[in-house]
């Protein structure tokens, strides 16, 4: 018998929670579903975000502000480039227009050699996000 799985919800470690939440909520349109205790505006150690059928969790990489290096640890941020989240998005062109209008640094979508229309974007912590859908024939 196969395991009954109903989804996947990755956990990303972020450098600055308010910055990350503002990006995911205000730029990408995610809803903040749940958080650990709130310590200030968009300031908490963990949250669950949802956009359509996609969920992600964010967690602060440093529990206390005095533990957080200034500036961010370059090696840690560079390692985030190995992580890619791919979101099924039937209207990649519309997503591109919306993100561009909100000031997000995005390039126009392109069709990958394997037939997926894709629009990559990077979050403030260097994680790769890609909005994609099968290209029309």
Image (cartoon, helix red, strand yellow):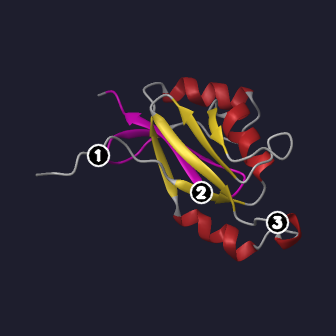
> Can you say whether 48 is above or below 60 in the image?
above
Task: Name which residue lies at 74% across and 29% down.
Answer: 102
Give the Cα distance between marks 1 and 2.
20 Å
Q: Quadrant of residue 88?
A: top left
Give the Cα distance between marks 3 and 1.
35 Å
Q: Quadrant of residue 79?
A: bottom right
Q: Position of residue 53 (x, y in %)?
A: 44, 31
Give whichever of 71, 64 is nearer the camera.
64
From this viewpoint, is residue 126 visible? no
Look at mark 1 in the image and give the residue it sits on.
5
Q: Secondary structure at mark 1?
A: loop
Q: Position of residue 84 (x, y in %)?
A: 50, 55
Look at mark 2 in the image and give the residue it sits on.
12
Q: Earlier in the sequence, mark 3 or mark 2?
A: 2
Circle number at residue 68: none
Look at mark 3 in the image and give the residue it sits on.
64
Give whichever of 112, 88 is nearer the camera.
88
Left or right of 44? Residue 71 is right
Left or right of 100? Residue 137 is left
Q: Is 122 one of the magenta-colored residues? A: yes
Give the Cα distance between marks 3 and 2.
17 Å
Q: Residues within 10 Å of mark 2 (few under 14, many from 20)?
A: some
Q: Quadrant of residue 11?
A: bottom right
Task: Name which residue lies at 54% across and 45% down.
Answer: 56
From this viewpoint, is residue 59 visible? yes
Q: Give the magenta range.
A: 111-136
Q: Secondary structure at mark 2?
A: strand
Asked if labels 1 and 3 touch by Cβ distance under 8 angstroms, the answer is no
Q: Earlier in the sequence, mark 3 or mark 1?
A: 1
Left or right of 88? Residue 49 is right
Task: Name which residue lies at 59% across and 39% down.
Answer: 49
Q: Position of residue 133 (x, y in %)?
A: 39, 34
């Amino acid at each position: 018998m196969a395991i009954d799985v109903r989804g996947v919800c990755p956990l990303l470690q972020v450098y600055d929670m308010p910055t990350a939440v503002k990006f995911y909520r205000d730029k990408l349109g995610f809803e903040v579903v749940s958080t650990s205790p709130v310590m200030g505006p968009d300031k908490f150690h963990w949250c669950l975000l949802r956009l359509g059928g996609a969920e992600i969790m964010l967690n602060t990489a440093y529990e206390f502000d005095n533990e957080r290096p200034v500036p961010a640890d370059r090696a840690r941020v560079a390692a985030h480039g190995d992580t890619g989240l791919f979101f099924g998005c039937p209207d990649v062109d519309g997503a591109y227009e919306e993100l561009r209008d909100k000031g997000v640094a995005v390039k126009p979508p392109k069709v990958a050699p394997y037939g997926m229309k894709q629009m990559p974007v990077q979050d403030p912590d260097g994680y790769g996000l890609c909005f994609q859908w099968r290209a029309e024939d």
